Amino acid sequence: MNPLISVILPVHNGEAFLSEAIQSVLGQTFTDFELIVINDGSTDGSAELLEQIRDVRLRLLSSERNQGLVHALNWGVAEARGSWIARMDADDICSPDRFARQLAYLKKHPGIDVLGTGAREMDATGRVVRPLKRPEYHDFIACEMLFRCVMIHPTVMGRAEVFKKIPYRTGPAEDYRLWIEMLEQGVRFSNLTAPLLHYRRHDSNETTAHADNHLTSMQVAQRDYLGRLLQMNVSNEDFKLHKMLFAAPGELPQGQVNWNGLRTWVMGLLEANERTNALNSRAWKATLFVAWCSLAKKMGSLEWGALPGFYPSDYQSLAYMKHYLLPQ
């Protein structure tokens, strides 16, 4: 009988953290899963480590040469026998109840197709650096995806039929581009706000090693999606302003922010959505409000005089704003 979940874990020269990552999956409180590990041409000790693991749930796929992350992911998806596909990376650590909690949520919310979770970012030594907060509800995820990737890839669990229908596309930022394609095809998303993964950042992991290409590819996709969804002509200057909203501290400009120019851009985003009705109006207002306040907080300047003249007050918007703007 087929397992309920197929866990897809690609690895290329990931020996340093691989054992800890795999044990966190095999140690889940929910046990009806297969763990598909794709050894993508590793030249370190990853292959030998994998061969020593004695667990019938582990399925090993091996490629003699490195064919890249997208090939490995699509290979794993094609081989998956479960009704649900869960992602995992070779350097992260799952909470023991991750699968159980995700399945419970998906059973309670049958309209959701893809479910992620919050996470804690940690360094190479395992020291927690910061929480990674993500929006819970689909409408807010759809809005915030116009600014950044809000589905943390190795936390995701989704319907196998969706992943088999919509494959990963070749190139950097493969996850962000996949979520956009899924959104455009009507796939419904959600996030558990609980941090159910420790997400490791280190010099040799995929995102860090190719950070410039990843960021550039994501911004190209983001700009195209913004123009397509809201039917806007996005100039270079417009996009410079847009990138400041939800920017990480290291991506912010030096010196003063052009708050009045930014306010004009934000009001233009609101008007574009009123014209196209592409996004939930209340969620869009709340997203822009949070983006503005978060930027002001990072820059150490409230700039209340330039604040957009709206304040979302429905329950979901208030919960969303509280999640981001209040310390945890």
Image (cartoon, helix red, strand yellow):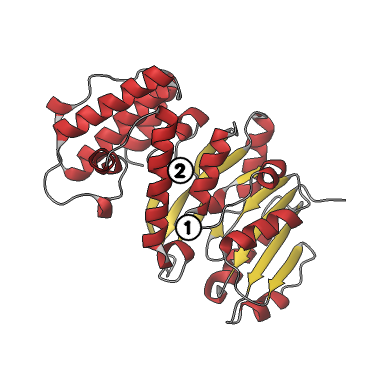
Q: Residue at x 71, y 61 (%)?
A: 36
Image location (x, y in percent) of residue 106? 65, 35
Q: Residue at x 58, y 64 (%)?
A: 21
Image quadrant of residue 319? top left
Q: Going by the image, does 305 lie left or right of 173?
A: left
Q: Answer yes or no: is residue 234 visible.
A: yes
Can you say whether 46 is above or below 195 in the image? below
Q: Which residue is mark 2?
A: 150
Q: Residues within 10 Å of mark 1 (few under 14, many from 20)?
A: many
Q: Amino acid at mark 2?
A: Val
Disc on res. 172: 1
Q: Residue at x 77, y 47 (%)?
A: 4
Q: How many marks?
A: 2
Q: Amino acid at mark 1?
A: Pro
Image quadrant of residue 54? bottom right
Instruction: From the viewer's side, name the closer residue of 158 and 123.
Output: 158
Q: Alpha-carbon distance for marks 2 and 1? A: 16 Å
